[in-house]
């Protein structure tokens, strides 16, 4: 059974950085696609970044490209999201997910991800 647990959220000022972690069960890394998503009250869930574990190929939404980095550790137990130059618009509940098909490994395809964590809150404000 795939299990995902997020951590690392918190409050930071604009321009600051945070690193989110997603501890995953071994089965999650057998997935063709893993990713990070976020949701703010009143808005639809938004894709942030995705990665293919077998090739480490990454994909980013336009809103975070150049500021965020998704990565996997060598032990295949943790997925990270390094967030730099944070903006108030980055505030939200961040989820990690796994289980999307390889050919559809895009932040736009959140509906194809089968397994989700509970989320970790990120607040960016001055």
Image: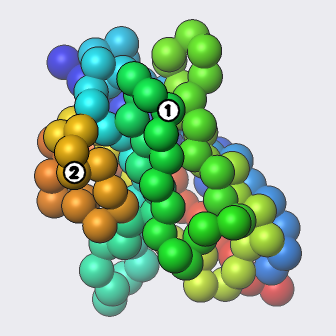
Residue 22 falls left or right of residue 113: right
Q: In the structure shown, which secondary structural element does the residue marked by tag 2 occupy?
A: helix
Q: Residues within 10 Å of mark 1 (few under 14, many from 20)?
A: few
Query: Residue at (64%, 51%) from the top-left corner?
Result: 69
Where's the N terminus, which quadrant? top left
| Residue 13, visible in the rendered structure | no
Where does label 1 land, which residue? 56
Query: Residue at (50%, 16%) from the top-left corner?
Result: 76
| Residue 11 x, y percent position in the rendering | 72, 66
Tags 2 and 1 in contact by the CB under 8 Å rule? no
Name the disc covering residue 113, or none: none
Residue 32 falls left or right of residue 77: left
39 w.r.t. 41: above or below: above
Quote the CA–CA distance across marks 2 and 1: 15 Å
Question: Is tag 2's residue or tag 1's residue first in the polypeptide sequence?
Answer: 1
| Residue 105 x, y percent position in the rendering | 29, 49
Where does label 2 land, which residue? 104
Where's the C terminus, which quadrant? bottom right
Residue 24 falls left or right of residue 33: right
């Amino acid at each position: 059974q795939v299990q995902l647990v997020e951590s690392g959220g918190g409050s930071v000022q604009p321009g600051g950085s945070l690193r989110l972690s997603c501890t995953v069960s071994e089965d999650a890394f057998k997935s063709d696609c893993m990713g990070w998503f976020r949701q703010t009250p009143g808005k639809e869930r938004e894709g942030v970044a995705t990665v293919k574990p077998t090739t480490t190929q990454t994909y980013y939404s336009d809103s975070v490209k150049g500021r965020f980095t998704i990565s996997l550790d060598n032990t295949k137990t943790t997925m990270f999201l390094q967030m730099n130059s944070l903006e108030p618009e980055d505030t939200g509940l961040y989820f990690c997910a796994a289980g999307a098909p390889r050919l559809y490994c895009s932040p736009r395809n959140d509906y194809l991800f089968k397994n989700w964590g509970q989320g970790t809150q990120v607040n960016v404000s001055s």
